[in-house]
Image (cartoon, grey):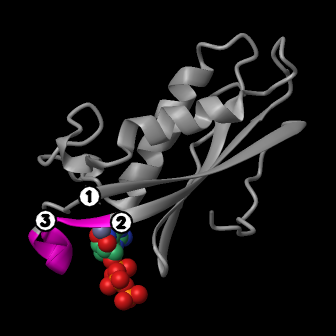
Amino acid sequence: MLQQIYPPAVHPYQYELNKDLQFAAAHYVPAEEAGKCRRMHGHTYFANVTIAGDELDRTGFLVNFATVKQLVHDRFDHTLLNDDAESFNEEDPNRFPTTEVVARTICEIVQAHLDRTENKPRCVQVFLRETPTSYCIYRPKRPTGA
Ligand SMILES: Nc1nc2c(c(=O)[nH]1)N=C([C@H](O)[C@H](O)COP(=O)(O)OP(=O)(O)OP(=O)(O)O)CN2
Ligand SMILES: [Zn+2]
């Protein structure tokens, strides 16, 4: 597993948890301007998911590290991202499986799970490395009132 110091997420919470995980997936970017990336190819994606909150659950966790891995790895590992119609769409650039959109999608999947927990922590950052030289960081805007 890649060991790396990630850019810090700025947030007001007392606890911050980070989970590193990786998954292998294929994709293509369905746009003329994407050049060689229009052709199907694969990556080993490295993700760092940052979750923060003030309240722990009855296990003393913000959220179980294993759950974060399951949510992302089980969903995307050894898939063709373009086939995942729940997350991606070839008609809408905001839903093409680019590094940016995959990072945002991971954040949304994790947050949807966290919203169903008793302590309701927040996914405050997803760092997603697509290649040794390319990565994206997604930080959701804070919900109103948080
Ligand atoms: N803003 C984005 N630009 C590109 C994306 C993307 O998701 N967001 N994706 C690609 C390709 O899918 C490709 O996988 C990554 O491209 P790139 O970093 O150019 O890959 P290289 O290995 O060719 O990079 P080097 O410059 O040789 O290190 C393209 N752009
Ligand atoms: Zn790619």
Q: Amino acid at mark 1?
A: Ala
Query: Which badge, 1 or 2, comes first in the chain's sequence?
Result: 1
The disc placed on residue 26 is 1
x, y percentage for residue 2? 63, 67
Look at the image and say whether residue 37 sits in the magenta stretch: yes
Instruction: Residue under label 2, please give it.
Output: 43
Q: Position of residue 114 (x, y in %)?
A: 62, 23
Q: Is residue 64 above or below residue 73?
A: above
Q: Residue at x 70, y 67 (%)?
A: 3
The amino acid at mark 2 is His
The residue carrying pointer 1 sits among few (fewer than 14), some (14 to 19) or many (20 or more) residues within 10 Å by Cα, namely some
User: Picture coordinates of residue 73 (x, y %)?
Assistant: 47, 42
Q: Which residue is mark 3?
A: 31
Q: Does residue 116 appear anywhere in the picture? A: yes
Q: Nearer the viewer, residue 28 or 104?
A: 28
* Mark 1 sits near ligand 2, with its Cβ under 8 Å away: no
Tell me the residue at 62%/63% (across/down).
1
With 26 as the anchor, is 117 left or right in this view?
right
Name the secondary structure under disc 3.
loop
Give the magenta-colored segment's residue range: 32-42
Whether ligand 2 has any atom under 8 Å from the Cβ at mark 2 is answered as yes
Is label 1 in contact with label 2 (beta carbons under 8 Å)? yes
On the picture, is 41 further left or further right than 114? left
Nearest to N terminus: mark 2 or mark 3:
3
